[in-house]
Image (spheres, rainbow, N blue to C red):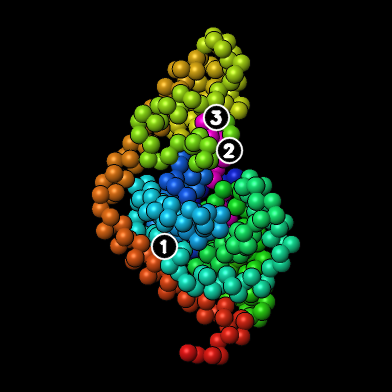
C-alpha cells in the first residue's frame, strides 16, 4: 500500500507501513461511545486499511469488565454503541469483520494457556498497566483480571494471527508483551505457529481533551463522534487556548493550544492552518474567530457520522445481524488458532 493512503506514520521501529498481506486486528473497550481522539488515533487508519488488508475490529467487552465488573450492564449496553460508531464512520462489515470478544470462547482459552508463559512481575512492570493502576487508585487491590489483561490482549491479537495492530502509543507495551508470548508459544511448538505483530501508530499525536488534560469520558472533556452541533459548539468554546492571550491583538502561543491540536488533526487545509498559526503568534487573531473555524471543521466531519448513526440506531436488528455474522467468522479463525496452540501445550490428544 502506498504511504499516501495512510499518510506518514510516526517514525519508530515499533511502527511500520501496512502491506497487502497484513492481517489487521484492533479492539476497543466498550466504555461508552467513541470520541474524536479515537478517530484521529486509530479509527482513521482502520478506514484507510479497509479493503486493502484482512481486518477485524474486536469490541473488547471482557477487557472492559476487568476494571468495571460493577458496571457490567453498562459495558453490555456500550457494545452496541461502539458497533454503531464503527458502522457510522464507514466501517463496512462486508470488508471488515466486527466481533464481540466475549462471544469468542477460543480467546478465553488462549488466555488461560498464555497465563502460564508470563510472570506476575512482568505484568506488574507493564507501563500501561502501571499507569492505569495508578489512575484508578487500585493500589494493592488490583483485580487479577485487570493485571492479566495484557495476556488477554495477546490472545486477541494472536487469536487472529494478526500482524498489524493500529493503536495509540499507550498500547506499545501490549504489542511487546504479545510478541514475547508469541515467541514462547512458537518455542514450545517447535515451529512458527503464530506470527509476531507490529503496531501501526497514527501520524497525529494523541489528542488532548478540551481542557488540555488527557481526554477521558469521566472528565467529560472529549468530543464524542456522535456529538450534536450544540455539543460541538459548547466543547470548542470551552477549549483551552493560551491563558496569556487576553486580547485578539496580542501574540498567542500555538504550542499547548488545544484548538490548534484539533486543527492539526482534522483541518485538511494545511496552508490555512499554517497561516492561522502565523497570525496567532504574531497577534491579530482572536480566540473566538479561531474557534469558529474549528467548529466548522468538526461539524463538517461529524455531521454525516451523526446522521448515519441515527439511521442505524433505528435498525437494531441490522446491527445485531452484523455482530452475529462477525462473531461467526471470527470463531472459525480463532478456533483454528486455538487448535494449534493446544498442540504446542501437548493438549491435542484428548479428543472429546
Ligand atoms: N486495550 C485496548 C484499549 O484500551 C483495547 C483492545 C482490546 C485492543 N483488545 C485489543 C487493542 C487488541 C488492540 C488489539 O483501547
x and y percentages locating residue 253 in the rendered image: 60, 20
x and y, in percent, of residue 316 in the image? 28, 55
Decide: marks 2, 1 in contact (CB < 8 A)?
A: no
Q: On the image, which quarter does residue 242 sit in?
A: top right
| Residue tagged 1 | 99
Q: Name the residue carrying label 2.
A: 214
Q: Is-magenta flag for residue 202?
A: yes
Q: Position of residue 177 (x, y in %)?
A: 65, 62
* Distance from mark 2 CB to nearest ligand 1 atom below 8 Å: no
Q: Residues within 10 Å of mark 3 (few under 14, many from 20)?
A: some
Q: Residue at x 38, y 50 (%)?
A: 81
In terms of image quadrants, where is residue 152? bottom right
Number of numbered discs on residues: 3
In this view, 15 is above or below 274: below
How crowded is the residue under tag 2: few (<14 C-alpha within 10 Å), some, or many (20+)? Answer: some
Q: Secondary structure at mark 3?
A: loop
The residue lying at 61 percent from left, 26 percent from top is 255
Instruction: Identify the magenta region.
Output: 197-211
In three-dimensional space, the C-alpha distance between marks 2 and 1, rounded to whole angstroms, equals: 28 Å
Question: Position of 276 compared to 327: left or right?
Answer: right
Whether residue 194 is visible to the viewer of this picture, yes or no, is no
Residue 98 in view here: yes
Amino acid at each position: 500500500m502506498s504511504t499516501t493512503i495512510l499518510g506518514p506514520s510516526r517514525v519508530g521501529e515499533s511502527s511500520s507501513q501496512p502491506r497487502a498481506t497484513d492481517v489487521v486486528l484492533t479492539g476497543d473497550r466498550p466504555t461508552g461511545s467513541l470520541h474524536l481522539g479515537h478517530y484521529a488515533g486509530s479509527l482513521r487508519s482502520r478506514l484507510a486499511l479497509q479493503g486493502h488488508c484482512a481486518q477485524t475490529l474486536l469490541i473488547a467487552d471482557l477487557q472492559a469488565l476487568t476494571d468495571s465488573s460493577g458496571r457490567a450492564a453498562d459495558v453490555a449496553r456500550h457494545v452496541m454503541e461502539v458497533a454503531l460508531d464503527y458502522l457510522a464512520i464507514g466501517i463496512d462489515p462486508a470488508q471488515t469483520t466486527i466481533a464481540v470478544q466475549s462471544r469468542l470462547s477460543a480467546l478465553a482459552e488462549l488466555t488461560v494457556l498464555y497465563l502460564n508463559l508470563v510472570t506476575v512481575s512482568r505484568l506488574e512492570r507493564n507501563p500501561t498497566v502501571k499507569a492505569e493502576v495508578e489512575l484508578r487508585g487500585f493500589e494493592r487491590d488490583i483485580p487479577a483480571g485487570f493485571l492479566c489483561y495484557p495476556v488477554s490482549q495477546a490472545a486477541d491479537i494472536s487469536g487472529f494471527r494478526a500482524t498489524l495492530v493500529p493503536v495509540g502509543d499507550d498500547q506499545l507495551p501490549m504489542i511487546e508483551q504479545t510478541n514475547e508470548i508469541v515467541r514462547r508459544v512458537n518455542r514450545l511448538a517447535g515451529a512458527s505457529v503464530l506470527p509476531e505483530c507490529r503496531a501501526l501508530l497514527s501520524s497525529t499525536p494523541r489528542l488532548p481533551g478540551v481542557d488540555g488534560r488527557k481526554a477521558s469520558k469521566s472528565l467529560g472533556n472529549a468530543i464524542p463522534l456522535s456529538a450534536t452541533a450544540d455539543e460541538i459548539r459548547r466543547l470548542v468554546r470551552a477549549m483551552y487556548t493560551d491563558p496569556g492571550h487576553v486580547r485578539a491583538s496580542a501574540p498567542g502561543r500555538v504550542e499547548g493550544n488545544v484548538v490548534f491540536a484539533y486543527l492539526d488533526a482534522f483541518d485538511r487545509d494545511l496552508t490555512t492552518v499554517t497561516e492561522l498559526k502565523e497570525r496567532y503568534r504574531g497577534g491579530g487573531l482572536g480566540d473566538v474567530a479561531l474557534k469558529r473555524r474549528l467548529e466548522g471543521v468538526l461539524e463538517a466531519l461529524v455531521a454525516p457520522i451523526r446522521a448515519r448513526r441515527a439511521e442505524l440506531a433505528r435498525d437494531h436488528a441490522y446491527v445485531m445481524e452484523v455482530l452475529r455474522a462477525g462473531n461467526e467468522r471470527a470463531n472459525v479463525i480463532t478456533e483454528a488458532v486455538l487448535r494449534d496452540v493446544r498442540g504446542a501445550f501437548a493438549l491435542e490428544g484428548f479428543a472429546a
